Image: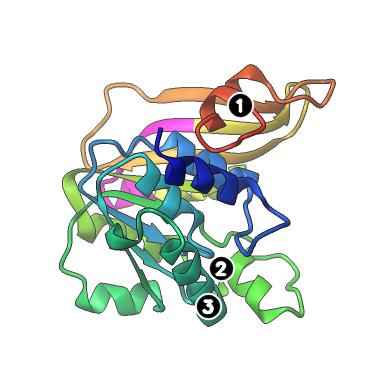
Amino acid sequence: MPNDYFRFKQFLVKQDKCAMKVCTDSCILGAYAPVAEAKTILDIGTGTGLLALMTAQRSEAQIQAIEIDALAAVQARENIAASPWADRISVYHQSLQEFAQHNQTLFDVIICNPPFYAASHKSPDKARNLAMHSHEFSLAELVHFSERFLSPNGCLFVLLPPAESRHLFALAENENLHLHSALQIFTATNGKHIRTVQEFSRNPATSVLSQDLFIRNPDNSYTPAFQQLLREYYLIF
């Protein structure tokens, strides 16, 4: 295993010691999406570049990442420049709407951890609002964009809370994007259902693969399934 690969695994998980902020939810999304065969990938709302980097680590794809927040886009570029995959990832400081105006690429994988607190109380922190609230971004726009720019056999992967994931399902069906798999994420084996990762494709599914992922055991240790999924990224496993 190349040394730079091992160093980057360390870089990813030093959450409090480097610029990159690592969210467990996003790590699950990045590890769950099958990207090995993808030639083109789009990360919508890349933040600090985590999902773009995780998909680069498991593919040979050309990856584009868009981010509306200027400071986050700068940080994403810095994190990507420090990685072994800088030559395959491009970061654009743009909204999804702006990106759509000039994009000519069809993507094999579109991956997104979108803002989702549409109706909740906003923080005084503008950057946090952009990251967590959907006033600058709608699920309808995400679905419409994906319908336009997915390759014929491409897949859209989205991470959302349960209620928002049900809304996304309805929007996707209206755009002829069909649910193929759903990963329900729980805090623990006896814990709360906090997020769902959904996979959509243009092609109708004969059946939907539905799985549950529990992050922790009752004793607060990580479950074997969580460890297996994140093994390539977390040095503690």
Q: Residues within 10 Å of mark 2 (few under 14, many from 20)?
A: some
Can you tell which mark lies on residue 111?
A: none
Amino acid type shown at disc 3: Asp
- For the question of whether residue 165 can be seen, the reply is no
Residue 149 on the magenta span: no
Q: Residue at x 47, y 24 (%)?
A: 210
Observer-nearest residue: 101 or 22? 22
Q: Quadrant of the N terminus?
A: top left
| Residue 127 in the image, given as x and y percentages of width and height | 64, 76
Judged left or right of residue 53, residue 128 is right
Residue found at x 63% / y 58%? 21
Write the start and end of the magenta stretch as one range: 172-182
* Separation of residues labelled 1 and 2 (CA atoms): 29 Å
Circle on res. 134: 2
Residue beneath disc 3: 69
Q: Disc 3, disc 2: CB below 8 Å?
A: no
Instruction: Kindly identify which residue carries mark 1.
Output: 226
